[in-house]
């Protein structure tokens, strides 16, 4: 049978003001606030081959051989925590803005996203984003 030497306790380090329980460095708290300020997310809601809010002849909605650069428009709402304080966003309004910018009747290869960005103290902006291409 082996004999074991008695265990000795290691001396404890004395806490300093910066490492004392309940105290944190102000720089760490500022970093947490800065990251929270940039909090947000983007949800990809889908893809549509062609979309319009105008009354058009469906036979004219065949995608042309060449499309222009992407156009992006959005419709947004301001929120406090989760309560909207302006009118709700509208995907149709976002599409209308994109069409008006290019004086077009339809968007092709359209991607729909919903984005939310929050700033302290709980004020945020949520938007439907429509991005597509026009002839």
Image (spheres, rainbow, N blue to C red):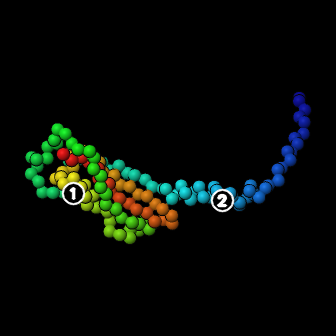
Residue at the spot x=35%, y=59% of the render? 127
Lateral position of residue 83 relative to residue 28, left or right: left
Picture disc at residue 26: 2
Q: Can residue 51 be seen in this snapshot?
A: no
Pick the residue in front: 99 or 57. Answer: 99
What crowding class fits label 1: few (fewer than 14 Cα within 10 Å), some (14-19), or many (20 or more)? few
Quarter of the image where one finds residue 68: top left
Which numbered circle lies on residue 100? 1
Q: Nearer the viewer, residue 94 or 6?
A: 94
Looking at the image, can residue 8 be seen? yes
Secondary structure at badge 2 equals helix
Q: Residue furthest top?
A: 1
Residue name at image x 9 percent, y 46 percent: 59
Q: Quadrant of the N terminus?
A: top right
User: Dividing the picture into quarters, in which one does residue 33 lie?
Assistant: bottom right
Coordinates of residue 23 in the picture (x, y in percent) = 71, 60
Mark 2: give few (<14), some (14-19) or many (20+) Cα within 10 Å: few
């Amino acid at each position: 049978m082996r004999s074991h030497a008695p265990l000795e306790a290691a001396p404890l380090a004395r806490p300093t003001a910066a490492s004392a329980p309940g105290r944190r460095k102000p720089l760490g708290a500022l970093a947490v606030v800065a990251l929270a300020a940039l909090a947000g997310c983007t949800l990809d809601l889908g893809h549509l081959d062609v979309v319009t809010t105008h009354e058009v002849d469906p036979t004219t909605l065949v995608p042309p051989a060449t499309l222009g650069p992407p156009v992006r428009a959005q419709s947004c709402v301001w929120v406090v925590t989760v309560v909207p304080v302006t009118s709700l966003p509208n995907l149709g309004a976002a599409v209308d803005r994109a069409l008006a910018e290019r004086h077009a009747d339809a968007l092709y290869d359209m991607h729909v996203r919903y984005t939310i960005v929050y700033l302290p103290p709980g004020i945020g902006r949520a938007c439907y984003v429509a991005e597509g291409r026009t002839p």
